[in-house]
Amino acid sequence: MTGWQYSHLKRAIDIVSALVLGILSLPICVMTAIAIKLESPDGPIFADIPLRMGRNGLRFRLYKFRSMIPNAHALLRTDPKFKQLFEEYKKSSFKLHNDPRVTKIGKLIRKYSIDEIPQFINVLKGDMSIVGPRPYYPDEIEIQQEKYPHTKGLIKNALSVRPGITGHWQVNGRSDINFDKRIEMDAQYASIISNSLWSALWYDLKILFKTPLAVLSGRGAT
């Protein structure tokens, strides 16, 4: 069986996994939603974030529980008081440690990746897979490509498959990994799952086995 055929098997596994895990996580989702509204009643439950880049560069809305103040992403780019923070954000591979926009409940749900649970909706819609490259922001790709011009081919390869809730770099350092290394890992993943069935299936299983430990450790979370 070829890598192309594996994509169909992978899609079937994604749908079943998203349904089962989504149902099992419903109690956590309800408690998280209540906690978010109690801390900041005027803000939405889901994060108000820009569109992400999916397979072949198609843009989609990614669902996450809101872990920041309302309108946090727009404020970072437009509010003068966040100008220095935005420059730091770009320099640190579009990740921030000790981000002042993160709420109290946000710190907890980000540490243990609870904010990512709504992405099962994206999996069911076909925007994402359970395992895959990180879903990047369009401006992130543009700015990072200027900073790391040698990554142009790697970016194209990484965007050839559906992004994932978890993936190679997420279980090997999470936000502690710089963009150039991260996109290299994502491109490597895309190449592997485009080959034979068994190498692709085994690679996905290894990432899935590592995911719970990476989540529970909270290492590299921002």
Image (cartoon, rainbow, N blue to C red):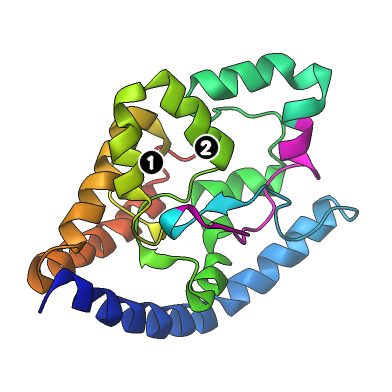
Question: Please, what is the dominant secondary structure of the magenta stretch?
Answer: loop
Q: Amino acid at mark 2?
A: Thr
Dots 2 and 1: beta carbons under 8 Å? yes
The magenta stretch is 57-75
Considering every residue shown, the one lying at the far right of the view is 42
Q: Which residue is mark 1?
A: 174
Q: Residue at x 82, y 59 (%)?
A: 37
Classify residue 84 as left or right of residue 142: right
Q: Which class describes the residues within 10 Å of circle 2: few (<14), some (14-19), or many (20+)?
A: some
Q: Position of residue 125 (x, y in %)?
A: 54, 76
Q: Amino acid at mark 1?
A: Arg
Classify residue 69 as left or right of residue 205: right
Q: Position of residue 42 (x, y in %)?
A: 90, 53
Nearest the camera: 13 or 102? 13
Nearest the camera: 218 or 207? 207
Classify residue 217 as left or right of residue 99: left
Which mark, residue 222?
Answer: 2
Q: Residue at x 31, y 54 (%)?
A: 213
- Which SS class for mark 2? loop
Q: Is residue 103 above or below residue 83?
A: below
Quadrant hosting residue 208? bottom left
Q: Position of residue 36 (x, y in %)?
A: 75, 57
